Image (cartoon, rainbow, N blue to C red):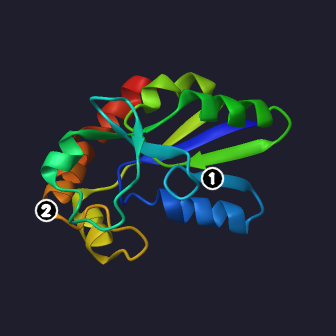
């Protein structure tokens, strides 16, 4: 039993893994889909409603907000996972603050050549459809493997 984290950059396949785990009968949650993570205002620390469409997430808006999860939510799931196996699939900007709660972590690493068409062609999530968001994803992709290895 335990709490397992499947993470990676946007477009690496975390949501697909979550769907497959559920199809196989596992309890699996998505940080995006299941209300585990939220945008936080960097100045006030308060959660804000996630803009559904890409245009309202301007570069200025993104710089003023961070996609994070509360440690408390992960702690609740870790307690529940003492009796059963639970997977969390997703990525948050503060995952290093909750890393210690997981029994194990798997990081999905994807090449730039594979990532770009996945972002451009996906229909279930519009993050990355604007140029500045795609550029952010590509910057994260460049260093993701190194960061995940440092975190263990």
From the top left corner, tell me how far across and down residue 55 is, in percent. Answer: 20, 66
* Helix, strand or loop for disc 1: strand
Viewer can see residue 102 = no
Disc 2 secondary structure class? helix
State the image coordinates of residue 130 (x, y, percent, origin top left): 18, 64
Q: Nearer the viewer, residue 81 or 62?
A: 62
Question: Residue, x 26% and y 47% (percent of image)?
Answer: 141
> In terms of depth relative to the viewer, which is nearer, 49 or 138?
49
Left or right: residue 78 compared with residue 58: right
Residue 71 located left or right of residue 151: right
Q: Could you classify mark 1 by the number of other residues whose Cα lies within 10 Å: few (under 14), some (14-19), or many (20 or more)?
A: many
Task: Give the label on residue 131, or none.
Answer: 2
Residue at 51% in and 61% down: 15
| Position in image of residue 80 (x %, y %) | 78, 36
Whichever of callouts 2 and 1 sits on the residue coming sooner in the sequence is 1
Name the side, left or right, on which 127 lies relative to 29.
left
* 124, above or below 38, in the image: below
Res 44 label: none
Mark 1, residue position: 29
């Amino acid at each position: 039993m335990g709490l397992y984290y499947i993470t990676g950059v946007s477009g690496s396949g975390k949501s697909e893994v979550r769907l497959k785990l559920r199809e196989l009968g596992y309890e699996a949650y998505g940080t995006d889909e299941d209300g585990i993570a939220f945008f936080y205002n960097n100045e006030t620390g308060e959660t804000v409603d996630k803009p559904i469409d890409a245009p309202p997430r301007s570069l200025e808006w993104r710089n003023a907000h961070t996609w994070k999860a509360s440690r408390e939510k992960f702690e609740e799931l870790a307690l529940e996972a003492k009796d059963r196996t639970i997977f969390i699939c997703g990525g948050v900007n503060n995952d290093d603050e909750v890393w210690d709660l997981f029994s194990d972590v798997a990081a999905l690493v994807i090449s730039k050549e594979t990532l770009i068409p996945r972002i451009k062609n996906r229909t279930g999530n519009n993050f990355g459809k604007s140029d500045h968001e795609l550029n952010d994803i590509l910057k994260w992709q460049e260093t993701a493997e190194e960061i995940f290895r440092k975190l263990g």
